[in-house]
Image (spheres, grey):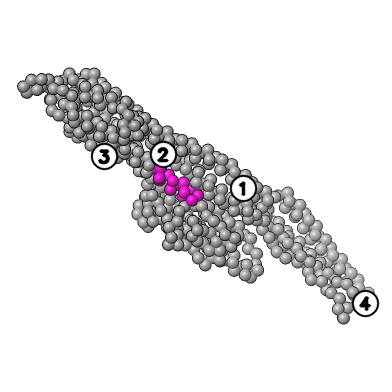
């Protein structure tokens, strides 16, 4: 009866584990569990027994193990971080490409620049035509608004990634850091529970699955190393200790470019969304610098020529543009009234380079050589623009950005394919296989029925023996 009971209990435990596996077949991160059975210690011969052989005492559940391939899981975490980095870069760089090539008005900056050069050409062809001069001022104002718009787009996108001052940073980067710390706090609790269970020789497979899921989530945010004892590190610094006694918060120490500390030490984030975001902020800073160089050179070149010319009254020209970069370039208020363009002064456009000789010299209203010189800037290769034209410089800037976005997308696609292959491999070896579980369930059911039959048969034999003896 004791042996039969041990078989019934073992089969019942097997059915419970199988039921648990089947119930969690669609649970993300679940690792299939298996009942490990072992023979009970036998009754060995001694001086009080007449037999000279061992008598078996049945079966016991020795453990419930979890299918887990350490090598595959470690490789998966590393690839998960890399995939998250390149996927993030692909998405953010494509967004930057769109923002750089479009303005609030919907057109491209290069289109407004071409209109600007064409407007100067029109003034050069007929410098006395006030409508052409007014059109030039309108075209110039539209160009400056396009510069302002692209600069604002880049600044706004950067703020979506990281803005504010420590410790009250906001944006996607701050959100990821908060999630990492939240996951780490949960892992600390789990590690403490798992460590205590190990000391007491208790198996806690579900807690380990939950910890693995949180570790996976962190690896998607930042590159980590996972020690065999469960310790998680970022750039060599401990985020969570394996025994659950230590948990350090990742903190942002500056916003542009973002820098981080962990356990009081500066850390470099390599891998995960954070790495992609940090790289993107660097790309934004580079784009802003190039755009400012572009705008600054336009301001300097046009102002240099415009102040060397003469307006319709024969007065030397004033600065055509004000500002220092893309975010604040404007048409000079002396020429253009942005609040009411009808109050602008197109007559102050310095289209000529000469005055009509005389005492005193008089305006040369038919001279458009200065306007032509400014229009010819469109074809000038300028040292401060890496010996490129204005249009060429901006085109190269956007082309390089597009190439980076395309490269990140291709790498991201390759990473995703490899990651899915790893996921399939892990699921194939460590996940729940319904066919196997059903076969195992049938086996446990038969074992349960057989052990029950032994119990009922033994009971029947005992009843017969008692009846005979009475």
Q: Main secondary structure of the magenta part?
A: helix
Q: Which residue is mark 2?
A: 96
Looking at the image, tell me whether mark 2 or mark 3 is earlier in sequence order: 2
Looking at the image, tell me whether mark 1 or mark 4 is earlier in sequence order: 1
Q: Which residue is mark 3?
A: 324
The 10 Å Cα crowd at callout 4, few under 14, some 14 to 19, many 20 or more, is: few
Between residue 379 and residue 243, name the one nearer to us: 379
Please state, as top left, top right, bottom left or bottom right, where the N terminus lies in the image. bottom right
Q: Position of residue 70 (x, y in %)?
A: 63, 55
Mark 3 vs mark 1, CA separation in Å: 53 Å
The 10 Å Cα crowd at callout 1, few under 14, some 14 to 19, many 20 or more, is: some
Between residue 269 and residue 154, name the one nearer to us: 269
Q: Which mark is residue 469?
A: 4
Q: Position of residue 411 (x, y in %)?
A: 53, 40
Please tell me in which quadrant of the rendered image residue 14 appears. bottom right
Between residue 450 and residue 380, name the one nearer to us: 380
Between residue 86 and residue 129, name the one nearer to us: 86
Judge whether residue 274 is colored magenta: yes
**Left or right, 418 with reference to 406:** right
Looking at the image, tell me whether mark 3 or mark 1 is earlier in sequence order: 3
Q: Residue at x 24, y 39 (%)?
A: 323
The image shows residue 356, relative to residue 345, as above or below, that is above
First to last magenta residue range:
270-284
The image shows residue 159, relative to residue 137, as above or below, that is below
- Asked whether the residues under the numbered discs 4 and 3 touch, taking CB atoms below 8 Å apart as contact, a structural biologist would say no
Q: Secondary structure at mark 2?
A: helix
Q: Which residue is mark 1?
A: 423
| Number of numbered discs visible in the structure rendering | 4
The 10 Å Cα crowd at callout 2, few under 14, some 14 to 19, many 20 or more, is: many
2 vs 3, front mark: 3
Q: Residue at x 61, y 67 (%)?
A: 197
């Amino acid at each position: 009866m004791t042996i039969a009971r041990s078989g019934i209990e073992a089969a019942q435990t097997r059915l419970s584990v199988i039921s648990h596996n089947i119930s969690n077949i669609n649970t993300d991160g679940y690792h299939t569990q298996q009942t490990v059975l072992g023979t009970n210690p036998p009754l060995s011969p001694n001086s009080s027994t007449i037999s000279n052989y061992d008598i078996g005492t049945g079966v016991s559940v020795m453990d419930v193990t979890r299918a887990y391939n350490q090598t595959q899981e470690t490789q998966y975490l590393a690839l998960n971080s890399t995939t998250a980095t390149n996927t993030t870069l692909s998405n953010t760089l494509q967004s930057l490409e769109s923002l750089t090539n479009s303005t609030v008005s919907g057109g491209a900056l290069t289109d407004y620049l071409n209109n600007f050069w064409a407007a100067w050409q029109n003034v050069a062809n007929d410098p006395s035509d006030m409508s052409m001069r007014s059109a030039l001022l309108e075209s110039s104002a539209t160009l400056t608004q396009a510069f302002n718009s692209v600069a604002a787009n880049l600044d706004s996108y950067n703020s979506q990634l990281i803005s504010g001052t420590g410790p009250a940073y906001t944006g996607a980067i701050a959100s990821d850091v908060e999630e990492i710390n939240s996951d780490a706090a949960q892992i600390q609790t789990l590690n403490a529970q798992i460590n205590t269970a190990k000391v007491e020789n208790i198996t806690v497979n579900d807690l380990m699955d939950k910890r693995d899921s949180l570790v996976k989530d962190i690896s998607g945010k930042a590159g980590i190393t996972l020690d065999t004892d469960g310790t998680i590190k970022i750039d060599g610094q401990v985020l969570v200790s394996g025994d659950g006694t230590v948990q350090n918060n990742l903190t942002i120490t500056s916003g542009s470019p973002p820098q981080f500390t962990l356990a009081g030490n500066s850390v470099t984030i390599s891998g995960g969304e954070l790495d992609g975001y940090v790289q993107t902020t660097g790309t934004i800073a580079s784009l802003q610098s190039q755009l400012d160089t572009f705008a600054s050179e336009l301001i300097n070149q046009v102002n240099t020529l415009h102040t060397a010319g003469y307006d319709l009254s024969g007065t030397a020209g004033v600065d055509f543009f004000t500002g220092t970069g893309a975010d604040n370039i404007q048409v000079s208020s002396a020429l253009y009234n942005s609040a009411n363009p009808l109050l602008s002064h197109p007559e102050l456009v310095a289209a000529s380079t000469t005055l009509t000789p005389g005492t005193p010299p008089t305006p040369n209203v038919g001279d458009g050589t200065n306007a032509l010189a400014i229009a010819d800037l469109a074809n000038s290769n300028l040292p401060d623009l890496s010996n490129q034209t204005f249009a060429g410089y901006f085109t190269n800037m956007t082309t390089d950005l597009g190439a980076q976005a395309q490269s990140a997308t291709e790498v991201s696609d390759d990473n995703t394919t490899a990651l899915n292959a790893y996921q399939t491999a892990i699921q194939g070896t460590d996940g729940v296989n319904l066919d196997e579980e059903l076969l195992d369930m049938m086996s446990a059911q038969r074992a349960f029925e057989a052990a029950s039959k032994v119990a009922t048969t033994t009971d029947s034999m005992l009843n017969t023996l008692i009846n005979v003896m009475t």
